Image: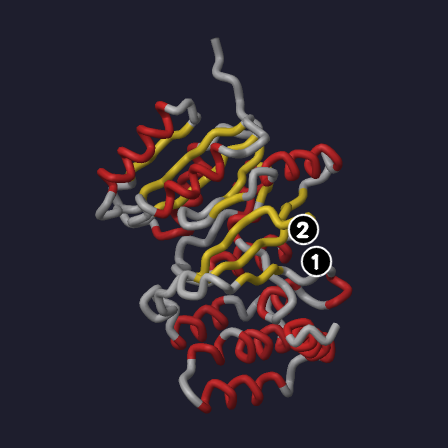
Amino acid sequence: MKDRIPFFSIVIPAYNASQSIVFTLESIKNQKEKDYEVIIIDDCSEDKDELESVVDSFQLSGMNIKLFLSEKKLNGSGARNKGVELASGKYIALLDADDEWYDTKLSVMRREIDKNKNEDLIYYSKVAIFSEIDPAFRKIMPLRAYEKKNGSIASYLFGCIGFIQTSTIVLKKELYLQIMFDEKFIRHQDYEFCIRADYLGYRFKFVDEILSKYKMSVMSPEKKGETIQYSMNWLNELSFVLTKNDIYTFKAFKLSKKYNGRKCYFIFLINFIFCSLQVKKEFIYSLLLKSKLI
């Protein structure tokens, strides 16, 4: 008898994540929607034996979970692509090994999918952002949905209003396979995925509910490979699709943070001046919101 096809395939890339992934998998286990499979792609971790033990324990608890141990380094993009290649579900739900979902994540996404059955959409939601070093820190993003009338998806992602966090994304498997993560990028691959999807004509559907938890890492961007030079090269790679406003917005709000001291403010100001009026309005709005003046 043919195996039943799950509605969701949850794809998790893992690298030295045997400790954090326990909380990730617990959040999946607690989902109200149970029609899913979990696919973990281990990316040449040093703790793969420990990860296998974690996966075994969740398998014993009844979770439909599979672990693939890659023999070559894939990085996040390649690991996600491999996971989707192995997936049998109708829809792909992306999840990182140090993130978690609220228990309504899959049920709410299924409800939204049922409402839009005949449309090929990329779903994303609000996310609660936490800090590893400040227990009191909590931020909800994005502040609004992406709408073409307000500018490009790049300026939405690079500015201070928008955010499409990887662990919020859900889409049809066949739709994912038409986009794929670009495996040459070790950082900013989430930006690139969304920018290219929009460029190819695919539409995004914002779900106005907090469904995911994202923990900001204490590891510096440089240690993750996100140097100033890398970011500049990345911008050049995407120059065919980015507008001048997109580039100024990235340099003002993303690149400036990589500089130390006064240079950080200088890089911000010299690029912010050339940003669109919409980007400037959204910056002021975010400041007022942070100051609790609105």
230 and 63: which one is in front? Answer: 63
How many numbered circles does the render carry? 2
User: Residue visible at 54% across and 70% down?
Assistant: 239
Indicate the quadrant containing the C terminus: top left, top right, bottom left or bottom right: bottom right
User: Residue visible at 42% across and 88% down?
Assistant: 261
Q: Which residue is mark 2?
A: 204
Looking at the rendered structure, the kind of residue marked 1 is Ala
Check whether the beta carbons of the residues at disc 1 and disc 2 lie within 8 A of each other: yes
Q: Where is residue 221 drawn, in percent x and y?
A: 38, 69
Q: Up-down: is 236 above or below 115? A: below
- At label 2, counting other C-alpha atoms closer than 10 Å, the crowd grade (few under 14, some 14-19, many 20 or more) is many
Q: Where is residue 16 drawn, in percent x and y?
A: 29, 49
User: Residue visible at 57% across and 35% down?
Assistant: 91
Looking at the rendered structure, the kind of residue marked 2 is Phe
Q: Is residue 164 left or right of residue 224?
A: right
Q: Which residue is mark 1?
A: 145
Residue furthest top as drawn: 1
User: Residue visible at 44% across and 37% down?
Assistant: 26
- Name which quarter of the figure residue 118 lies in: top right
SS at badge 1? loop
Note whether residue 118 is visible.
no
Q: Up-down: is 118 above or below 243? A: above
Q: Where is residue 263 drawn, in percent x and y?
A: 45, 89
Q: Up-down: is 140 above or below 263? A: above
Q: Is residue 260 left or right of residue 163?
A: left
Q: Is residue 187 left or right of residue 120?
A: left
261 and 199: which one is in front? Answer: 261
Rendered image coloring scheme: secondary structure
Q: Up-down: is 156 above or below 179? A: below
Residue furthest right as drawn: 149
